[in-house]
């Protein structure tokens, strides 16, 4: 388990120009901190890009990936279940841009 601390974010409500998708979609860029001894640690900082969906089935995280801030290099790591829940709850509470 990585120690995950969300320190900030930006969010944008995505527009479906053709009206093909139901519900609302939000793109989050979460700024996170991890401990220096964690294998994910980077001097540049870390982020999580999250696609968050709210539709007739309720809110959910559709997709996410971790990346190195500054270089935007995608990191091949997945969050633990409790970390995914932390990200989900954070996005749910902050979905209005």
Image: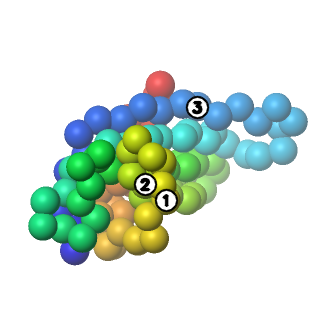
Relative to residue 30, is residue 17 depicted above or below? Answer: above
Return the x and y of residue 75 as percentages of the image width and height. 44, 64
**Position of the N terminus by quadrant:** bottom left
10 displayed left or right of 32? right
Query: Picture quarter containing residue 93?
Result: top left
- Indicate which disc, 3 or 1, sits on the residue closer to the N terminus: 3
Secondary structure of residue under mark 1:
strand
Disc 1: CA contacts within 10 A as few (<14), some (14-19) or many (>=20):
some
84 displayed left or right of 28? left
Q: Name the residue: 42% across, 58% down.
A: 66
Does residue 93 appear anywhere in the picture? no
Q: Residue furthest right?
A: 18
Disc 3: CA contacts within 10 A as few (<14), some (14-19) or many (>=20):
some
Instruction: Decide which of 20, 9 is in the foreground and name it.
Output: 9
Relative to residue 50, is residue 40 depicted above or below? Answer: below
Return the x and y of residue 19 as percentages of the image width and height. 83, 37
Instruction: Decide which of 2, 85 is in the foreground and name it.
Output: 2
- Indicate which disc, 2 or 3, sits on the residue closer to the N terminus: 3
Q: Are marks 2 and 1 in contact (CB under 8 Å)?
A: yes
Relative to residue 59, is residue 75 depicted above or below? Answer: below
| Residue receiving disc 2 | 67
Q: Name the residue: 24% across, 70% down.
A: 39
Distance CA(mark 2)–CA(mark 3): 21 Å
Instruction: Decide which of 2, 60 is in the foreground and name it.
Output: 2
| Residue receiving disc 1 | 74
89 displayed left or right of 41? right
Secondary structure of residue under mark 2:
strand
Residue 13 has which mark?
3
- Indicate which disc, 2 or 1, sits on the residue closer to the N terminus: 2
Q: Name the residue: 82% across, 32% down.
A: 17
């Amino acid at each position: 388990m990585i120690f995950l601390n969300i320190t900030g974010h930006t969010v944008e409500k995505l527009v479906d120009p053709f009206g093909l998708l139901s519900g609302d979609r939000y793109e989050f860029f979460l700024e996170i901190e991890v401990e220096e001894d964690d294998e994910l640690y980077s001097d540049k900082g870390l982020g999580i890009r999250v696609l968050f969906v709210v539709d007739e089935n309720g809110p959910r995280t559709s997709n996410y990936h971790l990346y190195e801030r500054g270089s935007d290099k995608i990191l091949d790591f997945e969050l633990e279940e409790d970390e995914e829940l932390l990200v989900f709850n954070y996005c749910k509470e902050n979905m209005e841009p």
